[in-house]
Structure formats: structure tokens, C-alpha cells
Image: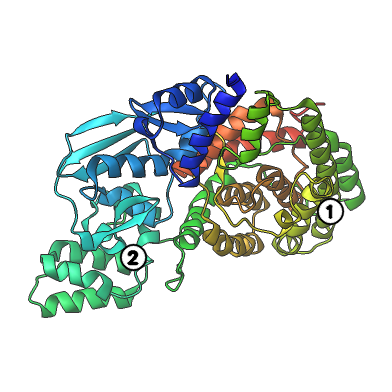
């Protein structure tokens, strides 16, 4: 007779078969009732809506949203395909956000389908899908992004509601800049006789400084006999010159975000101390604060069932709690890595305090910080040597966050931009706040992003003479909520004020973090 461990192992094998096929949205009939109930009881799957499930880590705490947010787009993909086949598309407005690189989990995903019922389907953590009864776009205007059927870029731009130019100006600007020639838009404009929309796009492209595209739309529509009246749908002029040849939506989007956010950072922060810093004293102060600069990792990987876990369950050696000895070894290697990284960060800061450009130093040495952070774990065999290769080659997720970090290809576009922005930025406070924010927004590594972001923040604070600032464990929730607002809502004010408060207390000699 099979033991409980053998029975659970058999169920886990069925779950692994689904995961090997990249099935994230699990239908009730994908698993037998016995396997399904066993996996639910042991916490390996959780119900999203009746008859639909996702995989979850067996030790995920009640109320933890991580497994849901990491599964969201692929769950929606399978659910929508099962319900509507090819008779659906994401709304043009939300399609436009996805094209702009804004793939945060929406509060409500708006879908159009001729089979829609105009009712919301409630999902986990106050998210939902609303399927509007409406004809779908022509198949020629549909493509797959984020695993769902979105409206292609040109059609999204043409058909989006004018209010998007005000409510989501950064995303719209980033999307418009992905169009390289007026011909990409003119086929749809001419076919539909969209003279009013053409006038709006002409005004939008002039606002962006893209005269060639604006003129191309105007002249072609005019020659086709349309009365085109130009209107500027944006509330303000585009504040910076954007790169029309940039193929990545993330680069222009982050340039715009940096420009818009820096004003709030400057307003929130105290003035930088005098520039004539005693380097020796500053370095001594840093060393004395070392022990309070706590380990804090923000990144997580996609949860999967491994063959090793199945065998541990089958043999009866599996326990829901991680082996204490393993945990202690991991903690020890993390602590050692943090110390080694701290040493090289101090060296970088010394160069910055000696007058070298802070962005240039970090560009040159950030890879050293990362390698030292994880070198002990490699030596102990806890991670592979290849994990030190550099920027990630897979998608990562952030625990409890609706924000999905930039894809692996986008990372290689954004990181050079980040170093460029740091080099060119005049205000140390902006370098510190936005350097930290853009780094974790990008999440360039598989692990250690939070620790390195705080090292980066402190290197940039040092460049303005601000004190090394520790983010206290007791303030973790406020810290995470502020980063979430910046990442999902593009509201930097909470994060800027939070860091400004910590820095101000440090300047007064009353640092908030204590041992």
C-alpha cells in the first residue's frame, strides 16, 4: 500500500507534467479529483476562480500575492483562450500600455469579445477580467504579447481614447516613438477615413518633435481628399528630446519618467551638504554602520516543482519547513557575500568622494559588487558559477508586487541608459532616489537586486555628501509600498519623501536604523 509521501509524490508528478508544458492556468479537468485535492491540501495549487487553479509554493503564507502576480498573464492567456478561442482581444488602451512596456498587473483587464457578457470575473487579490460584448479587431491587427491577444501598435495608437494622452502621457509618448514612419499609421487612417484621428496624431507627433511623421500624415491625408485639422492631444510639451531610432519602448519611457520624477525628488530632499568632505571621516562613518545595513532581497524566481522535490517527498524526507542546517549555510554565505561586496562598494565611494563622476564609477564597478555578493555562495556550491555571468537571461518577479520587471532583452537596453542618466544628472538626491528606483524597476539580476540597489543609493548619496543611509527593517512595509507606487503608478513622491526623511534624520545625527 502506498505511503502518504508516495501518494503526494504521484500528484506532484502530474503537476510537474503540466509545468513542463508551461501550463500556468490549470483547469480542473487537467488533474484528477484525487490529485487535485491532494495538491490543494498540501498547498501546491490554489484556486483562482471555480474550476481554475495556479501552482503555488507549498509554504506560501496566507495573503501572499506573489504566486498570483507572477502567474497573472499566463493564467489569463489560458483562461481567455479556453473561454473565447480567437474571439477576443485586449482593449486598445491596455494594448497600448503593453506596447509601451507597462505590463504591470492591472486592477481590471478589459477584454472585447462577441461572446462577452459585460460582467466582471473576480480573480485573486482584488483583480478581475471584464469581457465586453463587442466585435473584436480584425485578425490582421492582432498579435500575442504578454501571452494574450493584444491589438497591434499602429491600431492601438489610432483607436485609443483621446483621454489616454492626458492620463497616461508617458506611455503614449513611448508608444508613439516606436513608430518609425508615417506609412505604418496611414494604411489604417486612410482605410477608415479617420480624419479627426489623423489631426490628433499630427499634433501629437509635432509635440514630440517628429516633424517628418507629422508632415507625412498631413500631406497624405490631404492628397486623399480629407479635411484634416491639427490638434495637440497632450496637455504639455514633450519635456525632453526623445530618440526616434530607439527600438526598445523602455528607453524613452524611462527617460520620460526620470525627467518627470526628478522634480518631486528635488522638492522632497534637503540640500546636499558642503562638497568639501573629509574622506577619511566619511569612510570611518560608513564602516561603523556596516552591521545595521541588513540583508534584504526583493527578487524571486518562478515557482516550479522539481524532480528533486518529488524524490524527497517519495522517500519521506520532505518537510514543509526548510532544513535548518541548509538555511544557516545560506544565511552565512549571504552574510559573507554582503561583507565582500561592501568592501568593493567602499572603494567605489572613495573614488567618488575623490572627485570622479559617480555614474562613471558605478558603470565600471557595479559588476564587481554583484560578483562579490554571490562569490561565497558559488564557492559553497549553493549557486552555479554561471550565475555570476552578469545580467539575467530569464524573467524575474518581485514578491507581492504587481510590477513585472523589464524583460531580459530590455535589461540590456536600460542598464546603459541608467548609467548615462547617473553620469548626466546634476543633483545627488536625484541620482540616489531614481538610481535606486530604476535599478529595482529593471531588476537586472536574478537575485540580489534589492541589496545592490541600496548600495547604489548610498554611493549616489555619498556623491552629494549625504550620509550613508540604512533602510530599517521596521520600515520595510513603507519602503516596499513606496517602491510599488513608483513602479505601478509612476508616483515617486512616496519613495522620495521616505528616503528624504531617513537622510534628514541622518543629517541631524539621529539615524532611524538602530542595531
Q: Position of residue 170 (x, y in %)?
A: 40, 54
Mark 2 touching mark 1, by CB under 8 A? no
Q: Position of residue 460 (x, y in %)?
A: 71, 52
SS for callout 1 = helix
Q: Quadrant of the N terminus?
A: top right
Residue where numbered disc 1 is placed: 344
Q: Position of residue 128 (x, y in %)?
A: 33, 32
Q: Residue furthest front?
A: 1
Vertical comparison of 311 with 347: above or below: above
Determine which quarter of the picture holds residue 203. Answer: bottom left
Vertical comparison of 351 with 34: above or below: below
SS for callout 2 = helix
Q: Earlier in the sequence, mark 2 or mark 1?
A: 2
**Label 2 Cα neighbours within 10 Å, binned few <14 / some 14-19 / many ≥20:** many
Residue where numbered disc 2 is placed: 207
Eye-nearest disc, 2 or 1: 1
Residue at horizontal 38%, vertical 52%?
A: 98
Foreground residue among 58 and 425:
58
Foreground residue among 131 and 503:
131
Vertical comparison of 349 with 491: above or below: below
Give the number of callouts: 2
**Label 1 Cα neighbours within 10 Å, binned few <14 / some 14-19 / many ≥20:** some
Left or right, residue 408 beside residue 446: left
Residue at horizontal 47%, vertical 62%?
A: 252
Residue at horizontal 53%, vertical 48%?
A: 405
Residue at horizontal 40%, vertical 51%?
A: 146
Left or right, residue 484 beside residue 290: left
Determine which quarter of the picture holds residue 473. Answer: top right
Left or right, residue 4 beside residue 275: left
Amino acid at each position: 500500500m502506498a505511503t502518504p509521501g508516495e501518494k503526494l509524490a504521484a500528484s506532484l508528478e502530474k503537476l510537474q507534467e503540466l509545468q513542463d508544458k508551461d501550463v500556468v492556468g490549470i483547469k480542473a479537468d487537467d488533474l484528477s479529483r484525487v490529485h487535485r485535492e491532494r495538491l490543494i491540501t498540501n498547498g501546491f495549487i490554489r484556486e483562482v476562480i471555480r474550476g481554475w487553479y495556479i501552482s503555488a509554493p507549498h509554504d506560501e503564507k496566507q495573503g501572499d500575492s506573489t504566486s498570483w502576480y507572477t502567474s497573472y498573464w499566463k493564467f489569463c492567456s489560458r483562461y481567455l483562450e479556453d473561454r473565447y478561442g480567437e474571439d477576443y482581444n485586449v482593449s486598445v488602451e491596455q494594448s497600448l500600455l503593453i506596447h509601451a512596456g507597462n505590463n504591470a498587473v492591472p486592477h481590471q483587464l478589459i477584454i472585447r469579445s462577441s461572446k462577452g457578457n459585460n460582467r466582471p470575473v473576480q480573480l485573486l487579490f482584488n483583480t478581475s477580467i471584464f469581457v465586453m460584448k463587442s466585435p473584436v479587431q480584425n485578425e490582421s491587427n492582432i498579435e500575442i504579447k504578454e501571452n494574450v491577444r493584444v491589438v497591434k501598435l499602429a491600431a492601438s495608437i489610432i483607436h485609443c481614447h483621446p483621454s489616454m494622452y492626458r492620463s497616461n502621457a508617458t506611455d503614449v509618448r513611448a508608444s508613439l516613438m516606436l513608430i518609425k514612419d508615417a506609412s505604418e499609421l496611414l494604411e489604417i487612417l486612410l482605410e477608415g477615413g479617420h480624419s479627426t484621428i489623423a489631426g490628433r496624431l499630427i499634433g501629437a507627433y509635432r509635440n514630440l518633435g517628429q516633424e517628418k511623421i507629422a508632415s507625412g500624415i498631413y500631406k497624405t491625408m490631404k492628397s486623399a481628399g480629407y479635411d484634416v485639422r491639427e490638434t495637440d492631444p497632450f496637455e504639455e510639451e514633450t519635456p525632453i528630446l526623445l530618440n526616434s531610432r530607439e527600438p526598445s519602448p523602455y528607453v524613452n519611457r524611462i527617460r520620460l519618467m526620470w525627467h518627470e520624477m526628478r522634480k518631486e525628488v528635488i522638492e522632497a530632499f534637503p540640500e546636499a551638504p558642503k562638497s568639501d568632505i573629509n574622506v577619511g571621516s566619511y569612510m570611518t562613518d560608513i564602516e561603523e554602520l556596516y552591521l545595521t545595513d541588513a540583508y534584504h532581497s526583493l527578487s524571486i524566481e518562478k515557482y516550479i516543482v522539481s524532480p528533486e522535490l518529488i524524490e524527497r517527498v517519495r522517500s519521506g524526507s520532505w518537510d514543509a519547513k526548510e532544513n535548518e542546517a541548509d538555511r544557516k549555510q545560506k544565511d552565512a554565505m549571504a552574510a559573507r557575500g554582503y561583507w565582500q561586496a561592501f568592501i568593493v562598494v567602499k572603494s567605489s565611494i572613495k573614488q567618488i568622494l575623490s572627485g570622479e563622476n559617480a555614474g562613471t564609477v558605478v558603470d565600471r564597478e557595479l559588476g564587481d559588487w554583484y560578483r562579490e555578493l554571490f562569490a561565497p555562495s558559488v564557492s559553497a556550491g549553493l549557486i552555479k558559477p554561471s550565475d555570476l555571468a552578469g545580467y539575467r537571461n530569464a524573467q524575474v518577479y518581485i514578491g507581492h508586487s504587481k510590477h513585472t520587471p523589464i524583460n531580459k532583452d530590455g535589461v540590456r537596453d536600460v542598464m546603459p541608459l541608467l548609467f548615462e542618466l547617473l553620469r548626466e544628472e546634476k543633483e545627488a538626491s536625484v541620482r540616489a532616489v531614481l538610481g535606486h528606483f530604476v535599478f529595482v524597476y529593471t531588476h537586472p539580476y536574478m537575485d540580489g537586486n534589492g541589496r545592490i540597489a541600496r548600495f547604489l543609493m548610498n554611493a549616489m548619496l555619498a556623491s552629494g555628501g549625504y550620509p550613508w543611509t540604512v533602510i530599517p527593517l521596521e520600515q520595510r512595509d513603507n519602503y516596499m509600498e513606496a517602491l510599488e507606487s513608483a513602479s505601478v503608478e509612476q508616483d515617486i513622491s512616496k519613495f522620495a519623501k521616505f528616503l528624504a526623511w531617513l537622510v534628514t534624520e541622518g543629517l541631524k545625527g539621529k539615524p532611524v536604523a538602530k542595531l
